[in-house]
Image (tube, rainbow, N blue to C red):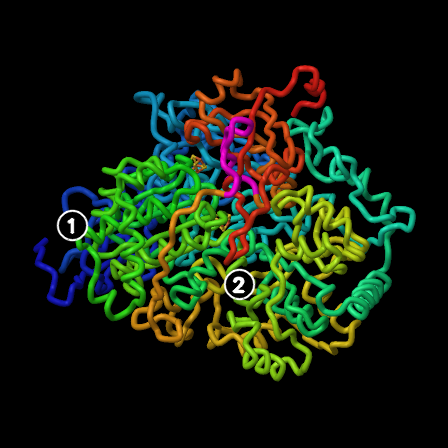
């Protein structure tokens, strides 16, 4: 066959099965056939992976002596391809029979239907090949099974060594767990050094299961719900309910059982069908028997107000945790048997009437300042919008906030000051266009796992990754440069980098002149931070600081991603100011592959902030203390009573409640008892409230202080929109019915609004969305009808034809003069430094498997099974110096309290530092944290306080029965 060069348009023209087809130059035959709707069977190939052509199932006839693998063979001009000749079909049938011969017996297992959507068995059906035919090849076995993972079953006999799982794990998720071991027939996939999967470094993302075509890797059923073929299940497209990445997924629902059978990633530009362990396996919390199903009212005899379970009442918050109340205690959730008797069931009418009456009475007696509301970043945009509207129009106060105060409030303060917008300037997917990316203060593999897979992939394709963090998170292993700085020294580090960039004249003079202000003041400040001084403060060698400066300064495009290691400090705003300045002086905002991206924590923290669920801003960040804004919203909402001043933040509301200022609160989906710093103080504040209504799906620690508890709907039970960290607005769809009398949150908020005289009549979230968009210019042009299956980025000038704006600020910033305002920052030490008595620095944060205060994830079978207990992570030398080994019980004490929990010896910690996740009630990290706040963003210093660590006293050791 004559092969000619591609034509000048970058396309090639060939014939496939007699049809003339034009394909992009470089396309494979498989891609060209697929695009033309021609099916070529395949086993080892998936369009998301680099082709390897090992299974030979996709061979086609290109007129050459040997068949060609369509997945690897490129299209060529003039090629004549046949995909389904009798010879090809015979070849495929023989191949299928051979592969099938080694497969294990396929008897139906009702709990784990290995036949569900098995691609090899589907081919066997297509070619009429069975394992039971009289002339079938003899079946072999003996490579074994592995059930050590709580969520994935491995059957090596079913493996055909197609390497799809290897490529899924390594190339897609960047986890590098799977390889091969053995020789000849004994060859099999291996996890790490041929460890059992459950003991390996596998992070249970399930990508390998999604890739496996034969059932060698299968999901284990969760809560005994069988995994049936997709065709027998109801598919509901929605979005993951956990982190700000907002991965698109499909739940496959067994309607007979009213339960989810399994979850699967779905294509969307920000997740490309990937999921992490939480998204893939962590959804069954909604089916927990502990769901609240009826409204509850505190019994008269359970006053005076206070916590109801013994540990929350006092012992947990005391100096010495009692036996059996430590990190080793199994469960670690609110004890329903202890708390429920203090409440009686009520009708919705009775409960809502009581809520409306008590809040109205407190408002009448104490004025607007006596009322406050905490909304939730787990709720939809529509719910966040209605909640802030209720607090503002119903009670005339701006005392409404949510967990953004605890995660990126300082980042938002710095971004508003610097560039006039709190949202990201580019997406995390844009990292692929960056020459260099700084990832700082972010344990991305745990907190934003799917976003981290984009970072890992970018690094493999040539983006230089600079990782800056006190903890050597897994990202450090994927970084080109890792800077393990001392906690709380970020300003000194970035000032040192900027000092060197200016010294080397690597700044972008045109950008500085045309797009920034205050450069001279910044340059003056960083002059005092030569790399040697920065080294003294940060512990990062001066040479490394110089290298970072050169790599960043010489890059054509650089982008910075940051997490709460930057924001959760009393200097959080200064930290973010430095990142903004570093980008701006090198011209790195407003072009592809450049920009600023604070990685948002909760699934809808970006949306909740956009909706105005914050005390200083109305929707779309309109300043609450601007009279023109007040007038605009009074007109839009038909009220004349809006609060003319900023409201109190989360931490300020707690302080005010302690002093009797705020006396009545509406808490929607928040659990400040575990999430806020210094929980002894929070406990007193909650107890001091005259009236507290908690709307939630479970009995949380905060609900123990409630007068009324309203049973809410989980994420899985409602429709609504959610905005991810990229500014992607996506539709979430109802998957299941709410249990019992639990109700949709937006309807409950509306019912309360109507009981206090607001006359709302929203018929659906769609209707709320329409109103929202009318007062949120950034969401202009978005509607339920055009968000589609993958959502849209805002701003989006043309949503019918565009996914939205990836890179913002190409021409001007949102500041009044359109310029980036550079704000120099001097390094300041943390508020509570280590001392002889408290020699360790405590850092708190999240784990991969758990979420916030654990009320959802600790009720997920899989997540709890993988990570069942609280641990303090310590450097091996620190642990050894204290006589502690992995698994020993340690006591950790700060000036505010003491907890006891197991030791996790970890090379990821630097000496002198320790890390405790804050999800665990029985070893509540926030009992130790300090409630000092950043003066601008008002965010607490979760990342730094001084603690003492010691072996727990033997005489206090809980009995064996109390151990997990
Ligand atoms: S579950 Fe994820 S991390 Fe574990 S082996 Fe499979 S792809 Fe790799
Ligand atoms: S990365 Fe975040 S959004 Fe994606 S599956 Fe995991 S928790 Fe869900």
| Percent position of residue 343, x then y | 85, 48
Q: Residue at x 30, y 50 (%)?
A: 437
Q: In the drawing, what numbered circle is on residue 579?
A: none
Circle 2 packing at 10 Å, graded few (<14), some (14-19), many (20+), is many
The alpha-carbon separation of the residues under discs 1 and 2 comes to 57 Å
Q: Residue at x 54, y 55 (%)?
A: 938
Quadrant of the image occupied by residue 636? bottom right
Q: Quadrant of the C terminus?
A: top right
| Percent position of residue 460, x then y | 27, 43
Magenta range is 831-850
- State the residue position of label 1: 63
Along the horizontal axis of the image, is 352 left or right of 243?
A: right
Asked whether residue 144 appears in the rendered view, the answer is yes
Along the horizontal axis of the image, is 532 left or right of 566?
A: left
Q: For this rendering, which residue is in front, 713 or 837?
A: 837
Q: Is residue 182 above or below residue 159?
A: above
Q: For this rendering, which residue is in front, 469 or 195?
A: 469
Does the magenta stretch mainly form a helix, a strand or a loop?
loop
Along the horizontal axis of the image, is 582 left or right of 312?
A: left
Q: Residue at x 17, y 63 (%)?
A: 11
- State the residue position of label 2: 607
- Taking the magenta stretch, the answer to whether it contains residue 837 is yes
Asked whether residue 135 appears in the rendered view, the answer is no
Instruction: Return the residue found at the far right.
Output: 301
Along the horizontal axis of the image, is 836 left or right of 964?
A: left
| Percent position of residue 931, x then y | 59, 46
Circle 1 packing at 10 Å, graded few (<14), some (14-19), many (20+), is few
């Amino acid at each position: 066959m004559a092969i000619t060069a591609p034509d000048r348009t970058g396309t090639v023209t060939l014939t496939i099965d007699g049809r003339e087809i034009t394909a992009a130059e470089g396309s494979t035959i498989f891609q060209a056939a697929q695009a033309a709707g021609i099916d070529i069977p395949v086993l080892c190939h998936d369009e998301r992976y680099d082709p390897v052509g090992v299974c030979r199932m996709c061979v086609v006839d290109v007129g050459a002596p040997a068949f060609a693998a369509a997945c690897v063979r490129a299209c060529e001009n003039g090629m004549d391809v046949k995909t389904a000749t009798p010879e090809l079909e015979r070849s495929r049938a023989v191949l299928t029979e051979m592969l099938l011969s080694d497969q294990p017996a396929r008897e139906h297992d009702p709990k784990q239907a290995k036949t569900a959507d098995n691609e090899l068995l589907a081919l066997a059906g297509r070619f009429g090949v069975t394992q039971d035919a009289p002339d079938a090849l003899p079946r072999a076995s003996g490579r074994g099974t592995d059930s050590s993972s709580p969520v994935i079953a491995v059957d090596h006999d079913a493996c055909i060594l197609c390497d799809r799982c290897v490529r899924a794990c390594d190339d897609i998720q960047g986890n590098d767990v799977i390889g091969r071991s053995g020789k000849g027939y004994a060859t099999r996939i291996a996890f790490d050094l041929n460890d059992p999967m459950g003991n390996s470094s596998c992070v249970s993302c399930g990508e390998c299961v999604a890739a496996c075509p034969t059932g060698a890797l299968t999901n284990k059923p969760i809560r005994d719900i069988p995994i049936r073929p997709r065709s027998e299940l109801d598919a509901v497209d929605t979005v993951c309910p956990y982190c700000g990445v907002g991965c698109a997924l499909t739940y496959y629902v067994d309607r007979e059982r009213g339960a989810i059978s399994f979850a699967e990633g779905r294509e969307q530009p920000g997740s490309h069908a990937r999921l992490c362990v939480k998204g893939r396996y962590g959804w069954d919390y909604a089916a927990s028997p502990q769901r609240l199903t009826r409204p509850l009212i505190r019994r008269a005899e359970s006053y005076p107000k206070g916590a109801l379970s013994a540990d929350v009442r006092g012992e947990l918050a005391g100096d010495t945790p009692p036996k059996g109340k430590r990190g080793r205690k199994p469960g670690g959730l609110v004890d329903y048997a202890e708390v429920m008797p203090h409440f009686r069931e009520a009708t919705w009418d009775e409960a809502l009437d009581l809520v409306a009456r008590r809040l109205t009475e407190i408002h009448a007696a104490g004025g607007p300042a006596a009322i406050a509301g905490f909304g939730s970043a787990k709720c939809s945009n529509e719910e966040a919008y209605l909640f802030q509207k209720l607090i503002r129009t119903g009670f005339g106060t701006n005392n409404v906030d949510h967990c953004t105060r605890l995660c990126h409030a300082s980042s938002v303060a710095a971004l508003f000051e610097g560039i006039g917008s709190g949202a990201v300037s580019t997406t995390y997917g844009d990292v692929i266009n960056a020459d260099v990316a700084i990832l700082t203060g972010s344990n991305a593999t745990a907190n934003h796992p799917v976003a981290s897979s984009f970072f890992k992939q970018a690094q493999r394709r040539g983006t230089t990754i600079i990782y800056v963090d006190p903890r050597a998170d897994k990202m450090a292993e994927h970084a080109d440069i890792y800077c393990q700085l001392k906690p709380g020294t970020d300003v000194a580090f970035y000032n040192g980098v900027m000092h060197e960039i200016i010294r080397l004249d690597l700044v972008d003079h045109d950008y500085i002149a045309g797009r920034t202000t205050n450069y001279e003041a910044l340059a003056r400040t960083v002059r005092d931070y030569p790399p040697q001084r920065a080294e003294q403060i940060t512990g990062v060698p001066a040479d490394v600081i110089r290298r970072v400066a050169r790599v960043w300064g010489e890059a054509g495009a650089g982008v910075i991603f940051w997490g709460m290691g930057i924001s959760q400090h009393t200097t959080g705003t200064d930290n973010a100011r430095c990142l903004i300045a570093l980008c701006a002086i090198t011209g790195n905002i407003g072009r592809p592959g450049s920009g600023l991206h604070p990685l948002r924590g909760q699934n809808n923290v970006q949306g909740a902030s956009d909706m105005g669920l914050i005390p200083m801003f109305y929707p779309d960040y309109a300043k609450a203390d601007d009279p023109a804004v007040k007038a605009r919203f009074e007109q839009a909402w038909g009220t004349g009573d809006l609060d003319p001043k900023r409201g109190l933040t989360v931490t300020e509301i707690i302080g005010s409640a302690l002093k009797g200022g705020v006396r009545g609160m509406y808490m929607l989906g928040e659990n400040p008892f575990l999430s806020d710093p210094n929980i002894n103080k929070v406990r007193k504040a909650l107890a001091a409230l005259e009236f507290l209504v908690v709307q939630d799906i479970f009995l949380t620690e905060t609900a123990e202080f409630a007068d009324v508890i309203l049973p809410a709907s989980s994420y899985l039970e409602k429709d609504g929109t959610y905005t991810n960290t990229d500014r992607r607005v996506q539709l979430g769809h109802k998957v299941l019915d709410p249990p019992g009398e639990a109700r949709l949150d937006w309807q409950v908020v509306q019912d309360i609004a109507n009981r206090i005289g607001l006359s709302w009549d929203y018929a659906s979230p769609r209707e709320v969305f329409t109103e929202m968009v009318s007062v949120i210019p950034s969401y202009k042009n978005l509607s339920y009808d055009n968000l589609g299956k993958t959502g849209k980025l805002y701003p989006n000038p043309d949503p019918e034809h565009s996914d939205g704006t990836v890179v913002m600020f190409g021409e001007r910033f949102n500041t009044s003069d359109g310029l980036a305002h550079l704000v120099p920052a001097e390094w300041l030490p943390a508020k509570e430094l280590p001392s002889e008595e408290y020699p360790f620095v405590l850092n708190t944060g999240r784990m991969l498997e758990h979420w916030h205060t654990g009320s959802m994830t600790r009720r997920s079978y899989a997540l709890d099974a993988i990570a069942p207990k609280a641990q303090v992570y310590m450097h091996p030398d620190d642990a050894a110096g204290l006589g502690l080994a992995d698994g020993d019980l340690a006591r950790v004490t700060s000036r505010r309290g003491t907890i006891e929990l197991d030791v996790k010896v970890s090379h990821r910690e630097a000496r002198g530092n320790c890390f405790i996740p804050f999800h665990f009630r029985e070893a509540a990290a926030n009992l130790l944290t300090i409630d000092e706040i950043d003066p601008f963003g008002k965010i607490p210093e979760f990342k730094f306080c001084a603690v003492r660590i010691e072996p727990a006293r033997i005489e206090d050791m809980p009995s064996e029965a109390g151990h997990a």
